[in-house]
Amino acid sequence: MSQVWARVRGPQGQNLWFWVFVGPFLAGLMLFVLVPLGWSLWLSFFDAHNTVTPTRFVGLGNYRDMLTDPAFLDSLGTFSLFALFIVPTTFALSLGLAMLVEKALLGRGFFRSVFFLPTACSYVVAALVWKLSLFSGVRFGLVNTVLGWFGQDPVAWLSVTKPPWYWLVIVTLRLWLQAGFYMVLFLAGLSRIPRSVYEAAAVDGAGPGWQTFRWITFPLLRSTSVAVLVLLLINAYQSFDEFYNILSTTAGYPPYARPPLVYLYYVALGNGQDFGHGSAGAMILAVLIAVVTVGQARFLGLGRRSA
């Protein structure tokens, strides 16, 4: 018995301590991620109105309904376009901030903290601040007050669709919340570039500024850049909190700028309580994110060594 216990513990108790530290996280992953994912997949093949233990099997019927649902397809199309805009915009802003902070001679730690601080803010709280204070649409809203200083009329940011000013509200909020986090990732990547590379480039005649960035900095940030792009793309399709809290009203969510997760939220948890179609839509969205992410990662070479 003592030999079995010694074998389980491993040399110097390595196996035991491995499971002490990894076990809780593995249990949480199983309980809160894998089990709900498997249950959702199972529900997607059943007529599951108002129940999570359905008995009527419908096969791929829910998937067929979702893939022919104009509202769901419009939501997927809208957020594919949103991803095409927000991913490169956030990438460029984060990289620009990282370059500026990394070059700062004074207050580098202060600016790093200031730009990273929004990451710790709740999306719900930030969305309400944007909606009720900055872009409230009334004359005394902060942005409308600034416009008034220049003789401009107040803008109803969230209650008009032509022009769609609500996108400006959402995009500025998202950039404020996320740019600092990705800036830190780029700062970590910049810190790994040896100074000797820049010195050698200078000796070879490379000028500072754009030339150095184009031929030295950006190529050596390749691994970090690919990881940032993959994370940004996943986050774009998983948008929920800021959209829901900014655009939803007591009458529900408007039919425009509707993230797929918000649509599925109303399908599965709205008046219909249709868990079957909601789960099928969630599976379709998960497959779409996986396909686009894997395709992007392979195209950009995630995991390859930097040149």
Image: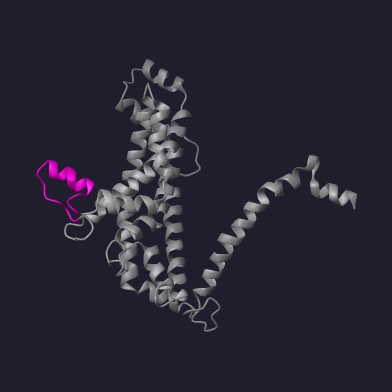
Q: Nearer the viewer, residue 44 or 149?
A: 149
Q: Position of residue 98 (x, y in %)?
A: 38, 33
Residue appearing at x 40%, y 26% in the figure: 108
Q: Position of residue 12 (x, y in %)?
A: 79, 39
Q: Position of residue 22 (x, y in %)?
A: 66, 49
Residue appearing at x 11%, y 50% in the figure: 153
Q: Is residue 94 left or right of residue 146?
A: right
Furthest residue toward top: 203
Residue 245 is covered by the magenta coloring:
no
Residue appearing at x 38%, y 45% in the figure: 178
Residue 148 is covered by the magenta coloring:
yes
Furthest residue toward bottom: 56
Q: Nearer the viewer, residue 209 or 123?
A: 123
Q: Is residue 98 left or right of residue 1?
A: left
Q: Is residue 11 left or right of residue 58?
A: right
Q: Which residues are magenta?
A: 138-156
Q: Quadrant of residue 117?
A: top left
Q: Quadrant of residue 54?
A: bottom right
Is residue 307 visible to us here?
A: no
